[in-house]
Amino acid sequence: MSFIGLFLSGAVLFLNSLMLMGKAEAKSVGVFNLFVGIIQVIIPFYLTMVSDQGHWSLYNYAAIFLFGLTYLYVGVTTLKGLDGSGLGWFSLWVAIIAVVYTLTAVIHFHDAVSAITWGMWAFLWFLFFLSNSLKMKIDHYLGMVAFIQSWVTLTIPSLLYFLGAWNTPAVNQIWLTVLIASIVYFCISLFKLRLFIPFVHTEKQ
């Protein structure tokens, strides 16, 4: 996937995380989702048209569409005040596709960093499904996960690539540690959330 696309995705996910945590106004964030979503649909469409049409080329460009269409869907849903159930089911579909990309990164490319990154994105899209379609009250947790992922899976890797430091052995080792630490933090936070919900219900009763 183009690192310019990753860079722009980092900005969108950062703003979306702030929106979910109640720190940014939804409609203004929705506008930015539309801007980047349009870019990340037009560019991969053009790249696909001029590509060699090889299956791995299409595989890489299809990944950009997953992000672009998600941002367009979020933008329209937010600006129009639509029910988010459709967005949630779309997010579940994308989460399943992201699992395939995760497995491909492991089995075919033997790339641990890409595999973990795609796994984290699959988890994030699945959380969007739980929030929008199943109406689970996890917006703050979802926002926290999105905030961290906006930096560790998108923004910082893109900057490192632009600086010529990405995919070096030292950075790969460091980034594996960063990604694993992020996953551990997500798991601990989720465990605390699951413990906290029954306690709230008990207090209300």
Image (cartoon, helix red, strand yellow):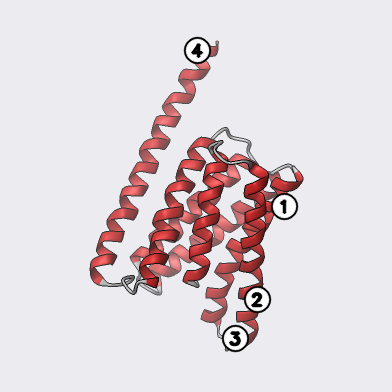
Q: Is residue 33 visible?
A: yes
The disc label shown at residue 45, or none: 2
176 horizontally vs 95: left or right = left
Instruction: Name which residue type carries label 2.
Output: Phe
Give coordinates of residue 194: x percent, y percent: 45, 30
Side (left or right) of 89 relative to 127: right
Say which amino acid is labelled 1.
Answer: Val
Mark 3: few/some/many CA within 10 Å (<14, 14-19, 20+):
few
The residue identified by callout 1 is 76
As measured in the structure, the alpha-carbon distance from the residue carrying label 1 to the one carrying label 3 is 31 Å
Quadrant where the C terminus lies?
A: top right
Classify mark 4: residues with Cα within 10 Å, few (<14), some (14-19) or many (20+).
Answer: few
State the CA–CA distance, disc 4 to disc 3: 59 Å
- The residue mark sitting in front, 1 or 4, is 1
Of residues 150 and 115, which is closer to you in this image? 150
Q: Residue at x 45, y 63 (%)?
A: 102
Q: Is residue 43 above or below residue 94?
A: below
**Placement of 200 over or under 184, stated as above or below:** above
The mark nearer the N terminus, 2 or 4, is 2
| Alpha carbon distance from label 2 to label 3 | 12 Å
Q: Which residue is mark 4?
A: 203
Res. 53 mark: 3
| Element class at badge 1 | helix
Picture layout, residue 126 above or below residue 191? below
Question: Residue 174 falls in which quadrant of the image?
Answer: bottom left
Q: Residues within 10 Å of mark 1 (few under 14, many from 20)?
A: some
Labels 1 and 4: the sequence-earlier one: 1
Mark whose residue sits in front, 2 or 4: 2
In the rendered picture of this protein, how many numbered marks are placed on residues? 4
Q: Earlier in the sequence, mark 4 or mark 3?
A: 3
